[in-house]
Amino acid sequence: MLLTKEKTLQGHSTKQYFPNIKINKKPLEDIYREVTVPLEVQSYFDNLESPLLLVVFHAEWCGDAITTTPTILKLADNTPNLTPYIFNRDEEVDLTNKFLPEHRANTVPVFVVLDSAFNEVARFIETAKGLVPKLDDMNESIRQQTSEDPENRQLIRGKRTAYRVMKANEWGSIILREFQETVAEGLKLPANKRPAEGGTEWPA
């Protein structure tokens, strides 16, 4: 058991965590507000036989966290069957890395789904696989827009963040459907085969 009950319950709710965000607070809040949970995803979680816990390791500086964290928290805050416990990943580096393969150490964000006995059901890493081509398109579009000043990292970062906010609802649907599929897979697995793993993958 990588997460004890005592440790899990130290995490914060969305209402507790958001006011203390120092970096990318506005885009994260904008995405949280804009995302609409797909009806089939909402129905799935609303009709679970037993409630689940969601441990979130969030990094304020991470682009994927700007998109994925508020999206999954929007779902958790809209169903009684998925209670979030949020941690600042930079304060929990060693613990977060325990949920990652060695070649992916320090990847963020990380979402860990637990049953009521605090046993791991599923984990979801970084963002949805189905979002990767759209992220590539975003990066190529921004590269073309900033080709005359490729070294301006702050400008590029700002354009990426604005693009993520603009695509919040479209991208959110992709993330939430894949997240739901991962959780559903985990609940179907026998305890000794868990957790199911979703999100992006990197070759070893």
Image: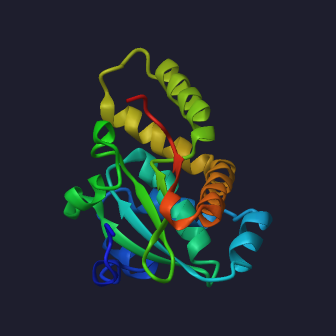
Residue at 55 percent across and 41 percent down: it is 163
Q: Quadrant of residue 189?
A: bottom right
Report the residue at 28% width, 41% height from top.
102
- Asked where in the image residue 47 lies, by quadrant, the reply is bottom right
- Quick one: 4 or 194, which is closer to the camera? 194
Q: Report whether 164 appears left or right of 130.
A: left
Please state the horizontal and vertical placement of residue 13, each as a whole percent of the image: 42, 80
- Looking at the image, residue 163 sits to the left or right of residue 40; the answer is left
Q: Is residue 95 left or right of residue 5?
A: left
**Residue 22: percent from the left, percent from the top?**
29, 63
Coloration mode: rainbow
> Percent x, y for residue 17?
37, 75
Tell which of 184 and 35 is nearer to you. Answer: 184
Would you say residue 122 is visible in this rendering?
A: no
Q: Residue at x 31, y 58 (%)?
A: 23
Determine the residue positioned at 61% across, 47% down: 166
Quadrant of image for the C terminus? top left
Q: Quadrant of residue 55?
A: bottom left
Residue 190, above or below 127: below
Residue 13 seen in the figure:
yes
Q: Indicate whether 129 appears above or below 61.
A: above
Is residue 100 or residue 188 the one in the foreground?
A: 188
Q: Position of residue 83 (x, y in %)?
A: 51, 80
Quarter of the picture holding the N terminus: bottom left
